[in-house]
Image (cartoon, rainbow, N blue to C red):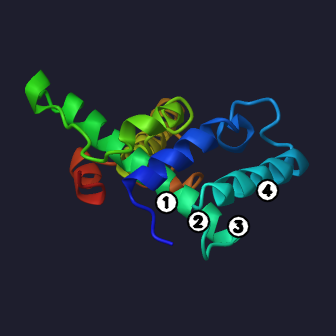
Amino acid sequence: MKWNANNIVDFLKIYEQHPVLWNIKHKDYCNTKLKDELFKQLYEQLAAKGLMEGMDEKQLKSKIKTIKDVYRHELAKIERSQKSGAGIEEVYSPKLLWFNSAHFFREVLSTRKSQSNLVSKFMFYCIIHAIVNKMHMFHKCFKITKFTYPFLLSQPSSTAMAKDFPL
């Protein structure tokens, strides 16, 4: 059964009453036995409302995941529009009729922020560069030959750094 916006609102009203199923901060969230029991209760409540026609528990779990993903995606759009320096009238406003009914997800669903691994690689390169420079200074101070420490053949140049790690 394909749910329309009203079906999703009805589902969310019932689902909100079972915080153990959705609130990762709830003390019983990790109690799988309790969650299984509550999920069966949820399924029965939804079936009584006529929302489970032709749908099994696995499909319901998939539908819940989709709703959470869509809600998270909409939150990310709002956050991006707020960070862009847009005026109040330009902040993204979700068009989903059920968005406000899913307000209880906001405290437990975070928008996924990706971080470029270029920053990590750059930091790693800078640390290695600093270590090699310290060793180079040690090499100079104590007149250690490059035969003693073959990895200290030359000090890395800033040109090499720029070439090896383009930003």
77 left or right of 87 in image: right
Labelled pair 3, 4 in contact (Cβ < 8 Å): yes
- Amino acid type at mark 4: Lys
- Could one spot residue 87 in this view of the protein? no
Name the residue at 46% across, 45% down. 9
Question: In the rendered structure, which amino acid carries the disc numbered 3?
Answer: Glu
What residue sits right under mark 4 in the picture? 40
For the residues labelled 1 and 4, say whether their Cβ atoms are less than 8 Å apart: no
Please indicate whether residue 77 sits to the left or right of residue 69 in the image: left
Label 3: which secondary element? helix
In the image, 10: left or right of 94? Answer: right
Q: Is residue 74 visible?
A: yes
Residue to which mark 3 is pinned? 57
- Label annotation for residue 66: 1
Q: Residue at x 13, y 27 (%)?
A: 85
* Amino acid identity at mark 1: Thr
Label 2 belongs to which residue?
62
Q: Earlier in the sequence, mark 1 or mark 3?
A: 3
Residue 22's quadrant in the figure? top right
The alpha-carbon separation of the residues under discs 1 and 3 comes to 14 Å
Q: Earlier in the sequence, mark 1 or mark 4?
A: 4
The amino acid type of the residue labelled 2 equals Ser
Q: Nearer the viewer, residue 92 or 112?
A: 92
Query: Residue, x 66% and y 35% (percent of image)?
Result: 17
Query: Marks 4 and 2: which is nearer the front?
Result: 4
Other-residue count near label 1 (Cα within 10 Å), few / some / many at <14 / 14–19 / ≥20: few
Q: Residue furthest bottom?
A: 54
